[in-house]
Image (cartoon, helix red, strand yellow):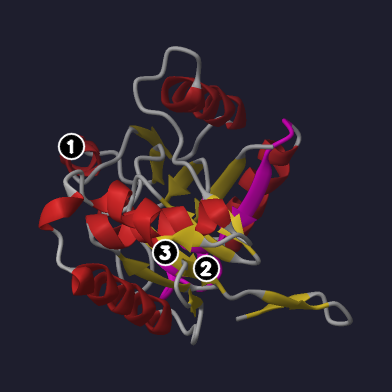
Amino acid sequence: MQKIMIVEDDPKIAEHLKTHIEKYSYDVTCVIDFDHVMNVFFEINPDLVLLDINLPSFDGYYWCRQIRKGSVCPVIFISARMGEMDQVMALENGGDDYITKPFSAEIVIAKIRSQLRRAYGEYATIQKDRVLEKAGLKFFPERMELTFGTNYVSLSKKEADIIESLMERYPRVAGREDLLEKLWEDQSYVDENTLNVNITRVRKKFQEIGLQDVVETVRGVGYRLNISWKEDENEAVF
């Protein structure tokens, strides 16, 4: 089921959109905390965003720019502003389409379908981000971002490569030689401590999103993610 995120501070309009869009079998989330829009965005990873311009704290142009820093998902502006410059600003700040209020709910659905086909359909030039997920920990290889709950952090290319290997091999060990081969084509010029330095950087990235002791050293072999489960509470422990 494709996910739609609505960022609209008028609760009646937001509920009207949500109710109508859900009739077409979309999973819809309405943002209610307009100071932390990106926290909701990274938590649900929507396929499309409906975004008002006039919002508390920061306007829709600002939030669209924030979305564009880490995602290519379609953004459709919905606004009472009818000026030509407003529509130009929406497109210049990363929007894909613009709907003026008052609007027809059927037009909204048609534009949603059109943008989803363009972004994720058979002939799309940009495919949906891959996501690797383990116990609530999410890694986005194309974005080079790591999230846990509402916390997220950007990664360097080598940090992303290491985390991708660890998550793909979990619960198995990612061997040192395998990691070296993935990170550096010619291992003969790699100092023995180079991998250790990069592993240390990866551990710091996990700490930045609130996770301690995630990367376990398996002496003489390599590294693996240290994830266990509390079966009685059905939650991840790192």
| Three-letter amino acid code at the position of disc 1 | Val
Kindly report which numbered mark, 1 or 2, lies closer to the viewer in this rendering.
Answer: 2
69 or 64, which is in the foreground? 69
**Residue that numbered label 3 is attached to:** 146
Indicate whether 63 appears above or below 75.
below
Q: Give the spatial CA distance, label 1 vs label 2.
A: 49 Å
Q: Position of residue 229 (x, y in %)?
A: 75, 76
Residue 108 lies, in percent from the top left, at 53, 31
Q: Whole-Å distance between the Cαs marked 3 and 1?
A: 33 Å
Please name the residue that numbered disc 2 is placed on: 224
Q: Quadrant of residue 193?
A: bottom left
Q: Closer to the camera: disc 3 or disc 2?
A: 2
Q: Residue furthest right?
A: 232
The quarter of the rendered structure image containing the C terminus is bottom right
Marks 1 and 3: in contact by CB < 8 Å?
Answer: no
Residue under the image location 36 percent in, 55 percent down: 177
Q: Nearer the viewer, mark 3 or mark 1?
A: 3
- SS label for mark 1: helix
Question: How would you rate the neighbour count of disc 1 (Cα within 10 Å): few for under 14, some for 14-19, many for 20 or more?
Answer: few
**Residue ID for mark 1:** 88
